[in-house]
Image (tube, grey):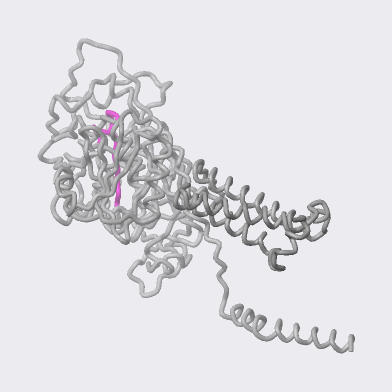
Amino acid sequence: MKLASVRQLWPSYSKYLIFLGLFLITAGLAIGFVSGWNLLAGITIALGTIAIALWLFTRGNLQSTWALRSTQSNTNALLATLAALLIFGAINFLGARYTAKFDLTEKQLFTLAPETQQVVKNLGQPVKIWIFDRTLSDSDRDLLTNYTKINPKFSYQIADPQVEFGKAQTFKVKSFGEVHLEAGNDRRLITTLSPETRLQETDLTNAIAQLSSTKQSIVYFLQGHGERPIEGEQTGLGDAINGLKTKNFIAKPLNLIREGAIPADAAAVAIVGPQRSLLDKELSALETYLSQGGRLLALLDPAADGGLGKLLAGWGVKLDNRLVVDASGTGQLAGLGPDAPIVTRYGNHPITQDFKGGISIYPVARSLEISTVSGVTATPIIETDEKSWAESDPKATQLTFTPPQDRQGPLVLGVALERAPSPAPSPSPAASPSPTGPPSPAASPAPSPTASPAPSPTASPSPGVTARPSPAPSPSSAAAKPARIVAIGNSSFMADGLFGQQLNGDVLLNSVGWLGDRDSNSLSIRPREPNNRRIVITPQQSSLLLLLALVVFPMGGLTLAGVMWWQRR
């Protein structure tokens, strides 16, 4: 039988065999990729191939068939589709195997700080973070994932404390949301998560940094003069004490009358909002401590300086008893009154070098006046803006600036002071102090390095103060260490409820870190915050925009369309 006769026996709809063949081949490939390359996939592809072959056989002269424009266009479309699918498949395969993220935000919001990357890269042992909760938010998971990408020694795990009861008992978990760090035999609580409290890079990095830091310093908080207590259930300073722990600082109370002198292991002494004046013996002990290179944190509220005014005056700081008033109106946006200045200006100092216009809040504050004293370096670290002033009558029904009794801003709320150490006296066998020699007050500035050596103030004990032999360092060690003071005209900024607001906690932690001679890497790591790009418009501007959107632009468009229609008509 001739070939032409065989083709005539095929029904006319045999021209659709090409579509059947393509469908069967596609179905076979889908079965192979989804269910595996089994017999069904092979049979389906074979049937599809046979159908296409029959279609070619019944189409007559293949050369003439391929010469048709429709055949060429359809073939080109098929090949382009297959090429596009192959390219997309290759891109998806490579994207799934080799992931890469690029942080294109202005402030690198999704990138870990350089300090964090350095700490995690230098991990000497595996570190694991345990989150004792049932779920973990996407933001917390992304943060932990960023840590794991830096070093494979870092890992994390979510554990339900009710399911993994044994593990929860090992870490002494008390509530859902606790985040613990485990490195070898070292276990410590980092924070407790809640719907309002999320995991912070600062907390994680500081906890990891503590693993390699064996230095624990003691900060003594003076008690007995109406200061906020640091012991008990409700101290008002719980957040600040916990924050100091993250920096490897231990807070201890100090009764200077009972002790008689500052303990030798004190990294710094903190005096937080005293309501009553210190006794002369206590002030003398502080002066002796500072003359030996001591460190003091003085947080003094208006109208209550604890008797430290004379001591600070010797360092060039005068305490202003007037209340600082902020007339900028920014406090009202935060629900605060004009007596709670919001600060965005900071000095060029290790304590505030990374603040860069951030916000800190100081309810009921006093200002400080700085003067030059030889041998003392004074750096204002916290300043208000020009719209503030020092109010002489804080009980007035309406606070208004009234010169000359009121002082116009900007005002200094905090200052960092450093006094050069006194030159070490020449060695002498007779090192015992003269009982009749009057002590040199510590408030007076130390002599300049070019001055002739003089006996150190530590050579004469303060009258009436029984100094123990152990606390006083040797004259040589005292001469090698400069004395430092951080004075701030407010103490409530570090209280519970305000410590975690904006930069308030960082002001305290960085101040103590500087007083304790911690290097700059141990200072706070500020989380990056996006710039506020919102447009604030007045009600009049809002009404104008509404009029333009609903009336002017639609009517203008309709009018233009009508004109064009009339012209074409």
Against 465, residue 429 (above or below) is above
Residue 87 placement (x, y as % from top left): 63, 48
Asked whether 350 or 124 is in front, the reply is: 124
Q: Residue at x 17, y 25 (%)?
A: 436
- Which quadrant is the C terminus positioned in? bottom right
Q: Residue at x 38, y 27 (%)?
A: 447
Q: Residue at x 78, y 87 (%)?
A: 559
Q: Residue at x 19, y 32 (%)?
A: 462
Q: Which residues are magenta?
A: 287-300
One can see residue 46 in this view: yes
Residue 123 placement (x, y as % from top left): 35, 31
Residue 255 placement (x, y as % from top left): 14, 42
Relative side of 176 to 6, left or right: left
Count of residue discs:
0
Asked whether 131 or 455 is in front, the reply is: 131
Relative side of 141 to 284, left or right: right
